[in-house]
Image (cartoon, rainbow, N blue to C red):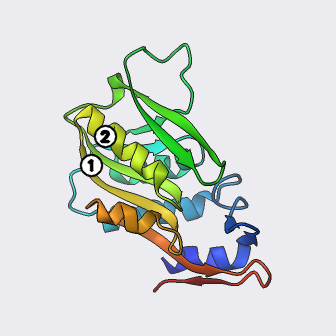
Amino acid sequence: MQLLKDRIRRDGKVKEGNVLKVDSFLNHQMDTKLFREIGKEFKRRFEGEEINKILTIEASGIGIACVVAESFDVPVVFAKKTQTKNIAADVYKSRVESFTHGRVYDIIVSQEFLGPKDKVLLIDDFLANGKALEGLADLVRLAGATLVGAGVVIEKGFQPGGDAIRAKGIHLESLAIVESMDEKTGEITFRE
């Protein structure tokens, strides 16, 4: 998606440790016009697929997932990282290791919102090592739902996540695949 690549080149900042900061438009401050285009692109890439739920993980995937869900006219469910008093005891649970946060945590979804009749598209902002998508896919499996595919806004192609997800037979669509980043020059190259 050229519009996204151009925006990453213009406003993305490469930080030490293979970190790409896109918080000025994607995952802190959100450019809703760009999100609408992202939603349309995922709708195009998964055209013809039967999807009745979008599943993401809190927190930075929620905004994108909502706009994508609007394109598909389906609800969004987001996996929570902590169980609160207002979540029923009946939950699906999976463990996830976060590249960004450098920690392992449980993600949960209430059984009320995910079940065997659901045809699920996973949506997330980033794909690095693939652990968040694997955890979400595990929740879909536990629910007996059908995993239609996964849509990621930015994939770090130089990290193993994309290959691992594809090796599992999951239909993965990444709107921008970063091939390399240089923290000294700020240069970002993309896979074509």
Disc 2 crowd, CA 10 A, few/some/many (<14, 14-19, 20+): many
Quadrant in which residue 84 is drawn: top right
Q: Position of residue 26 (x, y in %)?
A: 63, 59
Callout 1 crowding tier (Cα within 10 Å): few <14, some 14–19, many ≥20: many
Reading the image, the residue beneath label 2 is 140
In the picture provided, is 32 more to the left or to the right than 166?
A: right
In the rendered image, the vertical position of residue 108 relative to residue 164, given as above or below: above
Residue in the foreground of this view, choosing between 119 and 127: 127
x then y, percent, for residue 172: 35, 64
Residue depicted at 34% across the width and 42% down the height? 138
Q: Nearer the viewer, residue 35 or 83?
A: 83
Residue 103 location, x and y as percent? 63, 43
Q: Quadrant of the C terminus?
A: bottom left
Q: Is residue 137 left or right of residue 182?
A: left
The reply to whether discs 1 and 2 touch (Cβ–Cβ < 8 Å) is yes
In this orientation, does residue 155 appear? yes
Q: Does 173 appear above or below 88? A: below
Secondary structure category for the residue under label 1? strand
Q: How many marks?
A: 2
182 to 129, vertically: above or below: below
> Is there any visible trace of residue 74 in the rendered image?
no
Provide the secondary structure element on which disc 2 rests.
helix
Circle 2: residue type: Val
Q: Which mark is residue 147?
A: 1
Query: Which mark identifies residue 161?
Result: none
